[in-house]
């Protein structure tokens, strides 16, 4: 069975939700979420939500289809991270990236509430 998770990226005013269908445990996401956050911290990408969040999709594409060029199309998913409208009820982990504070945090999640901190 897949380990599912949600990622919330937020700035001071808004937030966007992303879903990961598999490998959502801390060791499965930490490298790519840190890659995204490092891009923000270094100034490679802007730290506002609407311009930064799309980069997570591209990082997930690179992870999901590493041998494919950036414009490669999969018949199932664009990559490891998909935009979504809310927190899914079947997740085991919830991660939050705060663009203003430049932080990454994560918790276990039972589909209804946060549990133990894992990141």
Image (cartoon, rainbow, N blue to C red):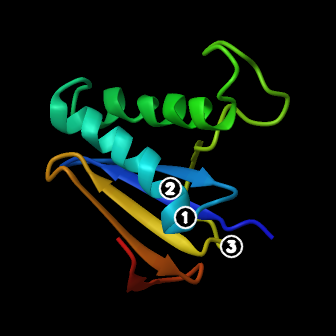
Q: How many marks?
A: 3
Residue indicated by mark 1: 87
41 w.r.t. 94: above or below: above
Q: Earlier in the sequence, mark 2 or mark 1?
A: 2
CB atoms at circles 3 and 1 under 8 Å apart? no
118 w.r.t. 47: above or below: below
Residue 90 is marked as 3
Q: Earlier in the sequence, mark 2 or mark 3?
A: 2
- Of residues 95 and 67, the one nearer the viewer is 67
Label 1: few (<14), some (14–19) or many (≥20) C-alpha neighbours in 10 Å: some
Label 2: few (<14), some (14–19) or many (≥20) C-alpha neighbours in 10 Å: many
Mark pair 3, 1: CA separation: 9 Å
16 w.r.t. 74: above or below: below
**Which mark is nearer the camera, 2 or 3?**
2
Residue 6 as seen in the image, left or right of residue 115: right
Q: Secondary structure at mark 3?
A: loop
Asked if one can make out residue 48 in the rendered structure from this viewpoint, the answer is no
CB atoms at circles 2 and 3 under 8 Å apart? no
Residue 67 as seen in the image, left or right of residue 49: right
**Which mark is nearer the camera, 3 or 1?**
3
- Of residues 14 and 54, the one nearer the viewer is 54
Label 3: few (<14), some (14–19) or many (≥20) C-alpha neighbours in 10 Å: some
Mark pair 2, 3: CA separation: 17 Å
Q: Residue at x 26, y 40 (%)?
A: 38
Q: Residue at x 69, y 23 (%)?
A: 67
Q: Position of residue 58 (x, y in %)?
A: 52, 28
Q: Position of residue 102 (x, y in %)?
A: 18, 49
Q: Position of residue 100 (x, y in %)?
A: 15, 47
Residue 29 is marked as 2
43 w.r.t. 102: above or below: above
**Which mark is nearer the camera, 2 or 1?**
2
């Amino acid at each position: 069975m897949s380990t599912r998770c949600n990622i919330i990226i937020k700035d001071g005013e808004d937030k966007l939700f992303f879903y990961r269908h598999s490998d959502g445990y801390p060791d499965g996401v930490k490298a790519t979420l840190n890659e995204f956050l490092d891009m923000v911290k270094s100034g490679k990408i802007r730290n506002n939500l609407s311009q930064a969040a799309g980069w997570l999709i591209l990082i997930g594409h690179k992870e999901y289809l590493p041998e494919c060029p950036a414009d490669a199309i999969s018949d199932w998913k664009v990559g490891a991270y998909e935009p979504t409208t809310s927190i899914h009820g079947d997740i085991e982990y919830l991660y939050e990236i705060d663009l203003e504070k430049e932080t990454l945090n994560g918790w276990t999640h039972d589909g209804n509430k946060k549990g133990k901190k894992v990141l």
